[in-house]
Image: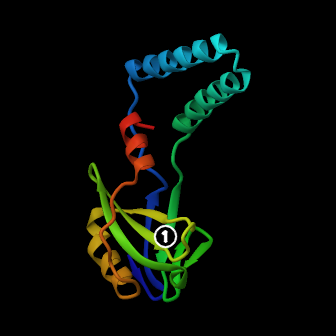
Amino acid sequence: MVTQSGISWQAEEYITREHNVGWYFGLFGIGLALSALAFFLKSWTFLALIVVSIIAILISISRPPRKIQYTLEEDGLKEGEKLHKFEDFKAFGILKEDSHFSAVLIPKKRFGLSVKIYFPGDSGEAIVDALGARLPMEEVKLDFLDKIVNFLRI
C-alpha cells in the first residue's frame, strides 16, 4: 500500500515450515546421540549445551511468527516501531526462498547485522523500486548459517 509517508505493508517476521513426526524423531535422535557422546567423554558442559539447544529449537519452532508492519520512509525502513536508517546500509539485495520474497539490507559496518524483511510478491516491484532509489542493489546469497537453517527446516 502506498501512503503519503511511503510504501507500507504487513508481513510475517520469518518463514514457517512444517515439521512431520520424522523431523522430531531426527531431532531427538541426533540430540540423544550427541548426549551419549558427551556423557562418555564426561563433558558435562557440552551435555548441558545440547539439552539447552534442543529445548531452544523446540520453543522457537512452536512460536508463531508475528505480523510486522513495515513502512519505507524517506530516511529509512520502519519495522514496527524501529527505524533502520538507510545511511547505515551500503546496499540491498533480493532473495527468493521457496515462494517467499525478502529484501536484505547490507550494513556498512563489517560486523553490522543485516536486516531481512519479507514482502508479498504483488508489492515487490514498488518495494524494490523504492529501495533502489535510496540504495544500490547487489546480488545476495544465503550464507552458510541460512543454508543450514533451511536444510534443518528450523
The secondary element bearing badge 1 is classed as strand
Residue appearing at x 49%, y 66% in the figure: 115
Q: Is residue 44 left or right of residue 120?
A: right
Q: Is residue 2 left or right of residue 98?
A: right
Amino acid residing under circle 1: Tyr
59 to 42, vertically: above or below:
below
Residue appearing at x 69%, y 20% in the figure: 43
Task: Measuring from the top left, give residue 117's x and y in whole percent.
Answer: 44, 63
Q: Nearer the viewer, residue 96 or 39?
A: 39
53 to 14, vertically: above or below:
above
Residue appearing at x 49%, y 70% in the figure: 70
The answer to which image quadrant residue 3 occupies is: bottom left
Q: What residue is pinned by disc 1? A: 70
Task: Measuring from the top left, give residue 101's x and y in whole percent.
Answer: 32, 60
Q: Is residue 27 left or right of residue 59?
A: left
Assess disc 1: are there few (<14), some (14-19) or many (≥20) residues with their C-alpha within 10 Å of its C-alpha: many
